[in-house]
Image: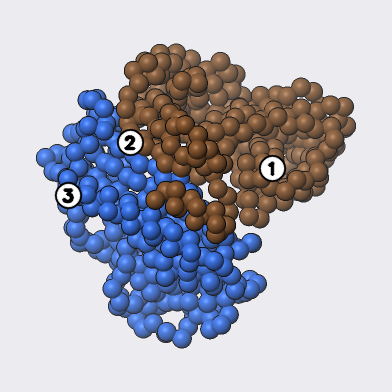
Chain colours: A blue, B brown
Amino acid sequence: MTYRKVGRVVRYENGTRISISEIGEASEEDGVFHARPAVEGPAQTRVSVPHSALADLETFVAETGANVAQTLLSVRSGRIERFIASAGIATHEINGSRWTEESRRVHISLVNAPLRALIDLASFDVEIVAKIADALARAGGERDSPKRIRLAPNVSAALLPSLIGELAMEQTGGGFDGRGRPIETRAVTHDPPPNWYRPGYAVRPLRAWMNIRALPFGRIDHDAPIAIALLEPVHGTSLRVLCVDGDDVFPTTVDGSHIAAVSREEPVWYPYAAGSFGVEMML
Amino acid sequence: MAQTLLSVLVRLETIEKINPLLLGAVMPPTTFSIASRDELWLRGALIESRLMHGVATQHGDAIEASDARDDELVHACDRAIDAARAAVASFRDARLRIVVRATHDGIETTMTIAVDGVSVVTTPSDALADYELLHRVRNGSAPLRGAIVWQNGSAAVLLHEAFGHANEHDAAPVTWPSWLSIDAPLASRRETFRDVPLMRMTHLIARQTNAPFVMPDERIEVQLVAGGAYDPMTDVVTVDVAVSSAGPFTIRRSRAEIAASLAGASGEPIRYPGVICSREGQELYVASHAPLMITDGLL
């Protein structure tokens, strides 16, 4: 069973734009994983992603350039340490299935020493970047974690993969997994996931819950302080976050193992693990 | 659009560090070609095998890349990985990752050998010696106090983080001992054709000249290091010791504290069994050498 991926991605990385075209194949035989570029002619002539999608990509590349500039303008009050934005399109083939996916990724780290805010998005959201940059610039000293605290969707999405089997959540159906199997809506449990995650053709696929989302319950206290950004990657269920409480902004560390409420608002997809939907949650 | 973006970046001065390669925006295009082979072996059995090849052409701050194949480089990889396999064929109790990278600048073969959860990074010519080292070293249970004696060239990892990476980030100078000289040149390097080249260390060689050296009575002897990091924002160096007379432990100190802790050294630089250095997600081999060194005040 050979997996084949035809893809093109455009990435801005700290001021450099890189455009990449490639076709790769992967297979597993007798327990050995093999990955290689496809063996035909030059990649530029082999790339055969759908024409309309390619046109969309060119449009998106132009839009991305404008969005990058807007994002930079929105961060007047801080320093951007790292800024990576990418747009990609790929056609996948395996086991008789063929499908096309588009992807958008934004990673920004903002610094106001000794604090570093990490932002990972699946779309350009200048508003959230500006909001975090503004708060970071006003941040005071470390404080104890508030007794009740809300997690913004971009923070809760990063925590969710650490709560698999501990919090009621489901895999969101739609699309195909890394082995061409449909992704179906399922309750997420401690059991082995039914689907396979293949982040790139040269990476051996692993079982994973895809596009997880927490099921809503309880009541969100909209007056509670809110964690608006991660200050470090999530370690287990420990979150070091930038917290806003009225006019006060401060770094704090919270234990995310006990969720008191999950909002009923429409969740937003974030690029954590094999996909995670973020929505406001309450600790 | 890319030129516009660059001008916005420069004008706003909001981005901390512009890739120095952008300064060559008026330079003629450059082309980078690469092929690599990568194999993972577990207890003598092949588990994973990858071939990668591609070409990247850079015009100012824009790079066009594809997986175009350079047969000469692919064949060079094939020959080198055959030789590498032969060098490690007898290591039946290890987890081995062999990586061969061929560019028009040369061929580089590296091997990561892991036994019982402890690993080294080596080259075919040193593979046997480093494999034997892995079987020789043992963690001890001494109390974690006193000076640290950095054996097997392991001080090179400390200096890789505290000197080399700090240099990559244009960190402010700190005062190093007058008896210490460090050669850690930077060059434009990238892991694959998909990556943006960065100014990265090519190697690190630390040397001592007439350094003091008195072996402390109370000491921790470091044999192997698991990894390290340098944070340019906080100027803090982290080193995770894998094997020592006190077992595994972590050092987390400012760069100035690291420099001030260097208390002595002896002999010629010793090759440390390798450093795979990761920055911006790009993993590159950095050959590392340092003499037997002593630090005090880090525990």
Q: Chain of mark 1?
A: B
| Residue A264 visible here | yes
Q: Is B265 left, or right, of A271 in this rendering?
A: right
Label 3 secondary element = helix
Q: Residues within 10 Å of mark 1 (few under 14, many from 20)?
A: many
The picture places residue B248, in percent across and down from the top left corner, at: 63, 42
**Given the image, on which type of amino acid does mark 1 rest?**
Ala
* Quarter containing the C terminus of chain A: bottom left
Task: Return the residue at label 2.
Answer: A202
Mark 2 and mark 3: Cα distance apart in space: 27 Å
The picture places residue A193, in percent across and down from the top left corner, at: 27, 53
Residue at image point 69% right, 42% down: B162
Residue at image point 50% right, 19% down: B106
* Quarter containing the N terminus of chain A: top left
Pointer 2 and pointer 1 on the same chain: no
Task: Return the residue at label 1.
Answer: B162
Q: Residues within 10 Å of mark 3 (few under 14, many from 20)?
A: few
